[in-house]
């Protein structure tokens, strides 16, 4: 009833005593019904009570614009509670959607992190290959970075396939010394098809 006293306070809103008594019977008659109505929509007792109290405050502030008829006031209160309850549901849906999207963003951030790690790994591999002697470097770039098969490399460089295989093998021995075991494994994965 604290809300009722606040609404009918003569300090804030000088209203005749007979008019201020009109709110109390309305509040007593409709408050519980409106709270129940709101709970059916939003499934939250405390929030439903807040919505209902806000509906009475809104009614009191706009009472001069509402036809002074109990049915019109009842319709206004139910309509106000319904709209506020639906707004709560919409707000909760927006929050849920944001959380889903935020979860998606976290997954997207993991994908971005994977891309960063991949870029760093490739930069290390490029650096190690660039440090090789020229003939080993060319074959390694064509094989591991461009994905060419041994026969394609041999045809392109006008050399025998056995020479390509031997130079790749020697390049791998040098790269093994320069790369960590993990990076070397990545390099082997990149060129697995060409090692045969």
Image (spheres, rainbow, N blue to C red):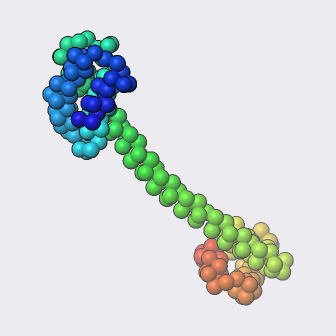
Residue ID at (32%, 13%): 64
User: Quadrant of residue 34 in the image?
Assistant: top left
Q: Position of residue 87 (x, y in %)?
A: 35, 34
| In-image side of 160 versus 10 (left or right) | right
Residue ID at (21%, 21%): 21
Considering depth in this image, is 174 or 154 the residue closer to the camera? 174
| In-image side of 47 versus 183 (left or right) | left
Q: Position of residue 139 (x, y in %)?
A: 76, 75
Considering depth in this image, is 134 or 50 the residue closer to the camera? 50
User: Quadrant of residue 128 in the image?
Assistant: bottom right
User: Quadrant of residue 135 in the image?
Assistant: bottom right
Q: Position of residue 195 (x, y in %)?
A: 64, 80
Residue ID at (41%, 46%): 95
Q: Position of residue 98 (x, y in %)?
A: 44, 47
Q: Image quadrant for the N terminus?
A: top left
Placement of 101 over or under 85, stated as above or below: below
Considering depth in this image, is 171 or 63 the residue closer to the camera? 63
Placement of 139 over or under 180, stated as above or below: above
Residue ID at (36%, 21%): 13
């Amino acid at each position: 009833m604290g809300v009722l006293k606040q609404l009918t306070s003569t300090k804030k809103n000088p209203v005749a005593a007979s008019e201020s008594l009109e709110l109390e019977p309305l509040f007593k008659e409709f408050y519980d019904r409106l709270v129940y109505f709101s709970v059916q929509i939003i499934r939250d007792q405390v929030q439903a009570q807040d919505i209902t109290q806000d509906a009475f405050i809104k009614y009191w502030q706009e009472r001069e614009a509402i036809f002074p008829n109990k049915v019109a006031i009842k319709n206004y209160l139910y309509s106000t509670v319904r709209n506020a309850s639906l707004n709560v549901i919409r707000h909760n849906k927006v929050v849920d959607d944001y959380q889903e999207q935020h979860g998606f963003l976290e997954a997207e951030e993991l994908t971005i992190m994977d891309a960063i790690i991949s870029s760093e790994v490739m930069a290390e591999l490029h650096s190690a290959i660039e440090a090789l002697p020229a003939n080993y470097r060319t074959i390694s770039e064509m094989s591991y970075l461009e994905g060419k098969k041994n026969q394609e490399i041999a045809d392109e460089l006008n050399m025998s396939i056995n020479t390509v295989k031997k130079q790749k093998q020697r390049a791998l021995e040098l790269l093994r010394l320069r790369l960590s075991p993990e990076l070397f494994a990545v390099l082997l994965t990149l060129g697995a098809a060409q090692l045969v």
